[in-house]
Image (cartoon, helix red, strand yellow):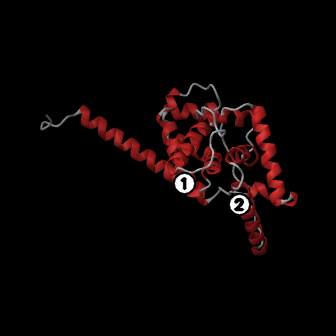
Amino acid sequence: MEEHIALDELKRGVPGADKRLVQQYNRTLWRIARGILRDDGEAEEAVQDAYLRAFSRIGNFRGDSSLGTWLARITINEALRRLHRRRETADLAGLVDGVDADHCGGPLAPTTPTPEQATARGEVRRMVERAVDALPTPYRLAFMMRMLEHMSIEETAAALHIPAATVKTRLHRANQQLRESLGAELAAALEGAFPFAGVRCEHLTHAVMARLAMVTAAATRWGSAHTHPSSNSC
């Protein structure tokens, strides 16, 4: 769906618009969050909170960047907040300078490998994921956004609020370190790393929609209570 159509439907409250937007951006936002947090479950929680934060202020979105970039920035902020609370000793000083809130993804291509192929691919993915997790945080995040999610240099730079030249430098160093740790023969396996389609995407979508429903219900109850106060209220 065209971005401006999705945004217009969301602002007008068209039924299902929020779910369609969540499904469109799920994988990219999860991969971004995981690039910061290095934990699958915590990345899911960060994305859920990012969606709630975005939906609560969607009316303030002015379109200065793409909707995807705006959502990515919100996700980055949420993941960084969680990382700060976790009090890790990793140096985050050069990760994001004044990050504010953006982009999207598509489904992974379905394949039907033999059991032997599936086992081999699974091991390769684990090797790649361990190597990516071992990258310094600034390199890892740029790599996840650019190489795995295919965001452009400009989109990645806008989401991180850093110059495009800095993105290129971080990508170069990330690739250099990965080549040293994995070898060039594993490069083809990168696309399959950090899989998201299927059960994980459905789980995250369901969780976001459930939380949105709870927020809406709570707001409705609050509004009703203040519109029709009981006779016993002081």
The local crowd at label 2, few if under 14, some if 14 to 19, many if 20 or more residues have their Cα within 10 Å, is: few
Which of pointers 1 and 2 lies earlier in the amino acid sequence? Answer: 1
Left or right: 143, with 23 as reference point: right
For label 2, the SS is helix
Residue drawn 74% across the image and 68% down it = 123
In this rendered view, identify the residue nearer to me: 173 or 118. 173
Residue 33 percent location from the top left of the image: 61, 48
Hey, what amino acid is under mark 1?
Glu
Q: Tell me the CA gap for discs 1 and 2.
A: 17 Å
Viewport quadrant of the N terminus: top right
**95 to 44, vertically: above or below:** above
Q: Which residue is mark 2?
A: 130
Q: Is residue 150 left or right of residue 216?
A: right
Residue where numbered disc 1 is placed: 42
Instruction: Determine the residue positioned at 52% across, 37% down.
Output: 54
Furthest residue to the right? 184
